[in-house]
Amino acid sequence: MEEEMKRVYLDHIAATPLHPLVLEAMLPYLKDNFGNPQSLHSIGQEASIAVEEARESVAQLIHANPEEIYLTSSGSESNNFALKGLAIAQRDRGTHIVVSAIEHQSVLHSVKNLEKYGFTHSLVPVDKWGMVNPDEVRKAITQETILVSIMLANSEVGTVEPIREIAEICRSHEVFFHTDAVAAVGNIPVDVSELGVDALSLAGNQFYGPKGSAALFLKKGTRILPFIDGGIQEGGRRAGTEDVAGIVGLGIAAKIAEREMGSRAGKIEPLRDKLIELLPQKVEHVILTGHPEKRLPYHASFCVEFIEGEAMLLNLDMQGIAVSSGSACTSKALKASHVLLAMDIDHALAQGSLVFSLIDETTSEDIDYFLEVFPPIIERLRKMSPLYTKYLEEKDK
């Protein structure tokens, strides 16, 4: 009888498994408790109460007030809502937006789309670690600037940005500040008051919640225009019948994350550090990407020279190992990551991106298995690589 292949999943930035307690809490709202929260009868009001309890849990996770939480369907929707809604609402004050060069596509495409309506934007550069210099943000702000959006942590290289310092600069210039915190919330402590942000995006699928569950924090008193028009849901700012089961799942995932975030990081960081230390020892010409210290606890990312990322992914998948190359939103595009290019990484090297994202269920044996399987794969692929052949020829001269 053929032995079953070992399975190792190291791509949790794309999807975390649903926590058992989250699933348990969601099930009643997928079956008997099917009411619409906007209905006045008791079945509808039961659903409404569940939605508001979840909102409170999400607010507590990021130290906000429940009335500052607007429930959405994804981190991308939250980013679109923030960028477009805030920009158009402040249009009478100016039309210039500042974002970093490594933002998620939902931010970059939003500001590009806003150009059709007369807005302009500036891209702030990053250093070799993917770190934004607050002084670069200060220099980019003009009298026309109404909004700055810089992510809290980057999902491709794991770097955690100096958001508090950037927020202070924005506040001193009376400019609204949004942060895409999708990769961070639920994984590292986030306090919107300490950060000083006006708006913040988060998503439940990053911390053991259901896909399709997310939120936008909007500081009380901040003017924003609706992104989705229609009904009166979310205080008239986000129309559409609520996904009660997903919202309940988001709320429970937020509660669990608040309670277990520290212990999760304690389990994951040693495994992350093991990967960061041993992979370059096992395979030559492997370069760590992202900041070596100021990075997400579950995240390790590299570039492997002379090989394209998709070749590595497919060969690893045949060995039962799932990893990523670039972000979940660009990994199928088979092109170099805009994040790595912004970090001044050579285009050919950027094609060899590998991203590992761990959870507390990841084991040391999982890392050992990857480190055992990976070197032969690289040896085989480099034998077929014209880039590696050229490197060897030049080396021998």
Image: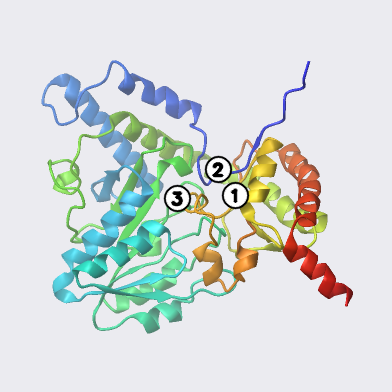
Query: In terms of image quadrants, where is residue 255?
Result: top left
The residue beneath circle 2 is 12
Residue at (58% x, 42% y) in the render: 264
- Figure quadrant of the C terminus: bottom right
Q: Which mark is residue 392?
A: none
Determine which quarter of the picture holds residue 175: bottom left
Left or right: residue 117 versus residue 185 is left
Q: Which residue lies most toward the right here?
A: 396
Q: Amino acid at mark 3?
A: Val
Mark 1 = which residue? 298
- Foreground pick, 304 / 358: 304
Can you see residue 367?
A: yes
Q: Secondary structure at mark 3?
A: loop
Q: CA distance from mark 1 to mark 3?
A: 13 Å
Q: CA distance from mark 2 to mark 1?
A: 9 Å
Label 2 close to label 1 by CB (< 8 Å): yes
Residue 78 x/y as whole percent: 32, 51
Q: Secondary structure at mark 2?
A: loop
How crowded pointer 1 is (Cα within 10 Å; few <14, some 14-19, many 20+) is rated as many
* Residue for badge 3: 185
- Secondary-structure class at tag 1: loop
Tell me the kind of residue under disc 1. Tyr
Looking at the picture, how far across and down is residue 342, in whole percent?
Answer: 52, 71
Q: Is residue 37 left or right of residue 281?
A: left
